[in-house]
Image: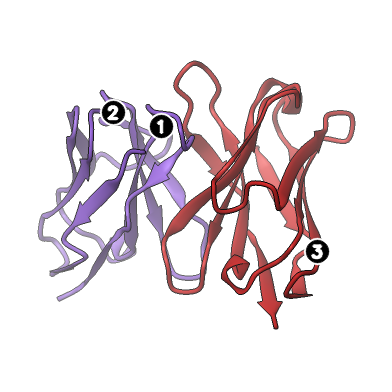
Chain colours: A red, B purple
């Protein structure tokens, strides 16, 4: 059974940093690209960042480029998201997700998410 | 950048009735479209991928159709557990990697 369990959320100051982690199990972690998706309170879903299975390719939404960093540890089956230069609009729930793989890849599993609150 | 729109924003339906949700892409995404269901306080769940293929464990009352720029999610006979927000998502074009629609909330009439 695929499980994705996020941790590391909480409150951060505007301009500050946080690191989110996602422990993955139930599949061969390094075979799959992984993605972070966020959801502001009462709003829709926003793709944030993605990383290839090997970790050598990363992709970011324009809204977080230069401020967030996605990485992974394939030995520990863990995905990370480093959030820096935090802004109020970064507040929301952050979901760790697994992609299906292939040329056209969609999200097939989601974690429960972790809450990030940015205060000024 | 591809923009996804969904209509209506809210759909009020009685249990047992049919619900039809629409999703439109600003340019063709072929059949590279997925639908997700999100209930309050829960993570989204994959319902449909490839525009029309049900994900594992999804009941047959959920069906998807369309290609190119126009897509439809149909729930043939709404059950109480189907009242939720539904998002479409394209995964055809880069950038960005994924684009979600704003969602359609299906609530009880």
Q: Which residue is mark 1?
A: B91
Q: Would you call the spot at circle 3 few (<14 residues within 10 Å), some (14-19), or many (20 or more)?
A: some
Tag 2, which chain?
B
Q: Which residue is mark 3?
A: A17
Q: Are marks 1 and 3 on the same chain?
A: no
- List x then y, in percent, for residue A64: 61, 52
Work out whether residue A56 or residue A5 is closer to the camera in this orientation and state it: A56
Say whether residue A85 is left or right of residue B77.
right
Residue at (28% x, 46% y) in the render: B4
Q: Are marks 1 and 3 in contact (CB under 8 Å)?
A: no
Distance between mark 2 and mark 3 Cα atoms? 36 Å
Q: Would you call the spot at circle 1 few (<14 residues within 10 Å), some (14-19), or many (20 or more)?
A: many
In this rendering, which labeled residue sits more in front, label 1 or label 3?
Answer: 3
Q: Would you call the spot at circle 2 few (<14 residues within 10 Å), some (14-19), or many (20 or more)?
A: many
- List x then y, in percent, for residue B14: 13, 69
Q: Which residue is mark 2?
A: B29
Q: Are marks 2 and 1 in contact (CB under 8 Å)?
A: yes
Say whether residue A63 is left or right of residue B107.
right
Tag 1, which chain?
B
Res B24 → quadrant: top left
- List x then y, in percent, for residue A50: 62, 37
Task: Residue lying at the far bottom in this picture: please name it.
Answer: A120
Work out whether residue A16 or residue A82 is closer to the camera in this orientation and state it: A16
Tag 3, which chain?
A
Distance between mark 2 and mark 1 Cα atoms? 8 Å
**Residue A77 vertical placement versus B107 (above, below):** above
Is residue A112 among what the camera can see?
no
């Amino acid at each position: 059974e695929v499980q994705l369990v996020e941790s590391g959320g909480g409150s951060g100051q505007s301009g500050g940093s946080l690191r989110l982690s996602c422990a993955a199990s139930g599949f061969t972690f390094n075979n799959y690209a992984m993605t972070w998706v966020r959801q502001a309170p009462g709003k829709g879903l926003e793709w944030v960042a993605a990383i290839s299975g090997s970790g050598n390719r990363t992709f970011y939404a324009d809204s977080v480029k230069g401020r967030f960093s996605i990485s992974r540890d394939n030995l520990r089956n863990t995905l990370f998201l480093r959030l820096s230069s935090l802004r109020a609009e970064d507040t929301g729930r952050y979901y760790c997700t697994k992609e299906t793989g292939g040329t056209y890849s969609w999200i097939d599993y989601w974690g429960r998410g972790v809450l990030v609150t940015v205060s000024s | 950048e591809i923009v996804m729109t969904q209509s209506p924003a809210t759909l009020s339906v009685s249990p047992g009735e049919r619900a039809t949700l629409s999703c439109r892409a600003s340019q063709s995404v072929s059949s590279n479209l997925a639908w997700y269901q999100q209930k309050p306080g829960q993570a989204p769940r994959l319902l449909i991928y490839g525009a029309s293929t049900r994900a594992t464990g999804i009941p047959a009352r959920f069906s998807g159709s369309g290609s190119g720029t126009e897509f439809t999610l149909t729930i043939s006979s709404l059950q109480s557990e189907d009242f939720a927000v539904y998002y479409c998502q394209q995964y055809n074009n880069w950038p960005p990697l994924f684009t979600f629609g704003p969602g359609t909330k299906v609530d009880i009439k």
